[in-house]
Image (cartoon, rainbow, N blue to C red):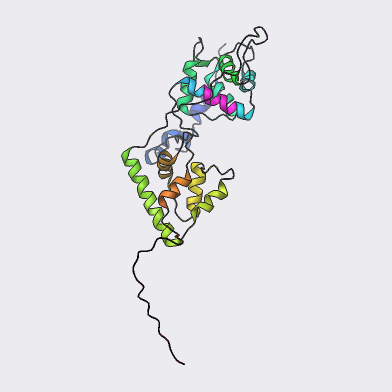
C-alpha cells in the first residue's frame, strides 16, 4: 500500500538518547547500586517432625475433634467439578482457613501420601478429609450398619527434635545468667509467667516466653529462645517455664531449717541505768 510507519520514524528521529542524552543506555546507577535480592522468609509456625503419615492424621483428628471442625468444608469450594482433586497450593490454603497449623515437613508428607494421578502437584482432598473425619463418623455408614465407629487413632507418637550437646551447653549458660539476675534483683519470676498462663498448664509459647523474659530485664534472641524450646519444650515447642525456673531459681526461703549444732556466741550484758 506504500504506507509509512510514522511512529517508528518519529521514534528514531526524536529519541531521548539523541536529543537529551538520557535513557536506559545512559543509566549508570546499576553499576553503583546492584540489584537487591528478595528477602527469603523462612518463618515457621510449627516445627513438628512426625515419624509417619498416621501421626499427622492422628494429630489432625485430635485438633478437629476439640474444635468440632469438619475439615472437608474448607476444600469443597476449590473443587468446582467435585472431582476430589485440588492443587497443593489450594490444599495449603484450605488448611490455613481451617486454622490447622502444620509444619513444612508434615505438609510434604501429606502431599506425598495423598498425591493425585494428575500432572503437577495435586492432592486427593476427599480421601484426606474422609480419614480425618473418622473421628466423628465413617463414610458409608448408612449403607453398612455393621461398621465400627470410634476407633480412629488420635494418639500421636511424634519424635521431637532433640538438642545436641552444644545447644544444651548454651541453654545452661542462659540459665546461669538468668540465675544471676534473679539473685541480684530478688525476682519471683513465676508470678510473671502465671499471668500469661491463664489455664495453669505451666507452659507458654516461645513468643510469650521471650516477652516475659524481656519484661524481667533479661532479653533473649530468637535463636536462644529456640534452643530453650528444644531443651524445655514439648512436641509443639511449648516451653515448660516451671522447669526452667526450677533450674534457675537460687532464692531459698527456709523456715525452721535444721540447725548446725554450734553454740551461740551471743553474750548478754546487763546495764544498770
237 within the magenta span = no
Q: Is residue 35 left or right of residue 98?
A: left
Residue lying at the far bottom in this picture: please name it: 273
Residue lying at the far right in this picture: please name it: 142
* Residue 80 coordinates in the image, percent (x, y): 64, 14
63 within the magenta span = yes
* Residue 22 coordinates in the image, percent (x, y): 46, 37
* Residue 105 coordinates in the image, percent (x, y): 45, 26
Q: What's the magenta bit mostly, secondary-structure-wise?
A: helix
Find the magenta span and give its range.
57-64
Q: Is residue 271 left or right of residue 153?
A: left
Q: Is residue 178 left or right of residue 98?
A: left
How many marks are shown on the rendered structure? Answer: 0
Q: Is residue 147 depicted above or below 179 in this figure? A: above
Pick the residue in front: 32 or 98: 98
Q: Residue at x 56, y 14 (%)?
A: 127
On the image, which quarter does residue 258 sit in?
A: bottom left
On the image, which quarter does residue 95 sit in?
A: top right
On the image, which quarter does residue 268 sit in?
A: bottom left
Q: Is residue 231 depicted above or below 122 in this figure? A: below
Residue lying at the far left in this picture: please name it: 165
Q: Residue at x 40, y 55 (%)?
A: 179
Q: Give the quadrant of the N terminus.
A: top right
Q: Residue at x 51, y 41 (%)?
A: 205
Pick the residue in front: 139 or 2: 139
Q: Residue at x 46, y 17 (%)?
A: 112
Amino acid at each position: 500500500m506504500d504506507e509509512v510507519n510514522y511512529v517508528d520514524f518519529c521514534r528514531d528521529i526524536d529519541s531521548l538518547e539523541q536529543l537529551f542524552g538520557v535513557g536506559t543506555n545512559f543509566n549508570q546507577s546499576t553499576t553503583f547500586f546492584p540489584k537487591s535480592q528478595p528477602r527469603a522468609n523462612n518463618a515457621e509456625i510449627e516445627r513438628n517432625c512426625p515419624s509417619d503419615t498416621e501421626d499427622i492424621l492422628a494429630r489432625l483428628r485430635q485438633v478437629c475433634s476439640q474444635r468440632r471442625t469438619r475439615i472437608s468444608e474448607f476444600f469443597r469450594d476449590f473443587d468446582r467439578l467435585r472431582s476430589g482433586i485440588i492443587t497443593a497450593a489450594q490444599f495449603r490454603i484450605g488448611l490455613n482457613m481451617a486454622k490447622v497449623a502444620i509444619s513444612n515437613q508434615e505438609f510434604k508428607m501429606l502431599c506425598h501420601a495423598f498425591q493425585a494421578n494428575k500432572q503437577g502437584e495435586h492432592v486427593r482432598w476427599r480421601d484426606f478429609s474422609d480419614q480425618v473425619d473418622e473421628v466423628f463418623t465413617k463414610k458409608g455408614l448408612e449403607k453398612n450398619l455393621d461398621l465400627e465407629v470410634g476407633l480412629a487413632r488420635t494418639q500421636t507418637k511424634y519424635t521431637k527434635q532433640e538438642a545436641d550437646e552444644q545447644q544444651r551447653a548454651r541453654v545452661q549458660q542462659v540459665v546461669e545468667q538468668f540465675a544471676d539476675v534473679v539473685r541480684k534483683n530478688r525476682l519471683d519470676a513465676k508470678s510473671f509467667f502465671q499471668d500469661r498462663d491463664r489455664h495453669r498448664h505451666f507452659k507458654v509459647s516461645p513468643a510469650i516466653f521471650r516477652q516475659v523474659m524481656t519484661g524481667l530485664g533479661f532479653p533473649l534472641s530468637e535463636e536462644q529462645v529456640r534452643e530453650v524450646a528444644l531443651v524445655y519444650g514439648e512436641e509443639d515447642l511449648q516451653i515448660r517455664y516451671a522447669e526452667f525456673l526450677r533450674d534457675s531459681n537460687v532464692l531459698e526461703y527456709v523456715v525452721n531449717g535444721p540447725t548446725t549444732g554450734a553454740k551461740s556466741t551471743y553474750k548478754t550484758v546487763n546495764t544498770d541505768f
